[in-house]
């Protein structure tokens, strides 16, 4: 309860500051009293803030969780810009501004541009926060966090390996395989050095995922518990041996 009230207070504070700034600089050059113009910006930005409590989880955590970050940012910005544009147009008309149907798309474009900047900034700040939290996370917590990107049935699974396929990663677990949209470098950074190591430019293998090793034509191969073969390039052989995997 205290945390929720703190978040609400923080949101209202940010909305108040932004509304005061837009009022002071006379954005859109609207008429009306100072109080009325402040109310316009306060309500309009509050509408956007309230909408974000639905839009952000809807886009980033549910329906577009595996989509490219740029696509998620654009989708969230568009969804946020719709109610904000409606609120803004209502207030502009109330303040005496002439708003024709042809001008509404222009107003939407202005709002969308601002929404894109705010959404991008929020995404980057949240990502930086997550990376900072990972620095102090235990190895098992890092794995659990990574697996949370996958469908629910993979929660609590044993992570064996990750292989890169174009812009996707194939996640190998004891419950099967799943493709996610992510770079191998980002996945390895998220998992940390304690959970496994890179064996090839397109492979990362968990310490717990190896069942056996084999050499084929002088090339070292790690056999995962699933029977899948993970290649080991010459560059990473010393690290594999040092980890006791070969």
Image (spheres, rainbow, N blue to C red):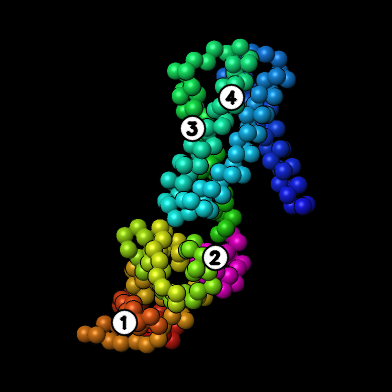
Q: N-terminal of the two: label 1 or label 2?
A: 2
Q: Position of residue 99 (x, y in %)?
A: 52, 15
Marks 2/3: CA–CA distance: 32 Å
Marks 4/3: CA–CA distance: 15 Å
136 up-or-down from 62: above or below:
below
Q: N-terminal of the two: label 2 or label 3?
A: 3
Indicate left or right for 53 with 172 as reference: right
Q: N-terminal of the two: label 4 or label 1?
A: 4
Q: Position of residue 46 (x, y in %)?
A: 65, 34
- Mark 2 sits on what residue? 145
70 up-or-down from 129: above or below:
above
Marks 4/2: CA–CA distance: 39 Å
- Mark 1 sits on what residue? 221
- Mark 3 sits on what residue? 113
Marks 3/1: CA–CA distance: 50 Å
Q: Position of residue 33 (x, y in %)?
A: 71, 15
* Category of crowding for the residue at label 1, using alpha-carbon neighbours closer than 10 angstroms: few (below 14), some (14–19), many (at least 20): some
């Amino acid at each position: 309860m205290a945390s929720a009230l703190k978040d609400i207070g923080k949101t209202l504070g940010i909305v108040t500051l932004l509304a005061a700034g837009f009022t002071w600089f006379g954005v859109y050059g609207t008429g009306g009293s100072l109080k009325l113009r402040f109310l316009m910006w306060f309500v309009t930005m509050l509408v956007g803030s309230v909408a974000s409590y639905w839009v952000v989880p809807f886009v980033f955590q549910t329906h577009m969780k595996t989509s490219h970050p740029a696509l998620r940012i654009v989708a969230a910005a568009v969804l946020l810009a719709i109610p904000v544009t409606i609120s803004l147009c209502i207030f502009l008309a109330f303040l005496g501004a002439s708003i024709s149907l042809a001008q509404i798309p222009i107003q939407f474009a202005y709002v969308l541009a601002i929404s894109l900047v705010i959404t991008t900034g929020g995404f980057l700040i949240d990502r930086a926060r997550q990376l900072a939290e990972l620095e102090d996370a235990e190895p098992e917590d890092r794995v659990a966090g990574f697996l949370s990107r996958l469908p629910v049935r993979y929660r609590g699974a044993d992570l064996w390996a990750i292989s890169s396929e174009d812009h996707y990663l194939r996640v190998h677990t004891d419950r099967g395989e799943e493709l996610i949209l992510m770079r191998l470098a980002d996945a390895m950074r998220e998992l940390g050095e304690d959970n496994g190591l890179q064996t090839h430019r397109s492979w990362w293998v968990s310490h717990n995922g190896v069942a056996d090793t084999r050499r084929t034509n002088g090339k070292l191969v790690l056999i995962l518990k699933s029977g899948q073969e993970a290649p080991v390039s010459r560059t990473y052989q010393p690290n594999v041996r040092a980890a006791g995997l070969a």
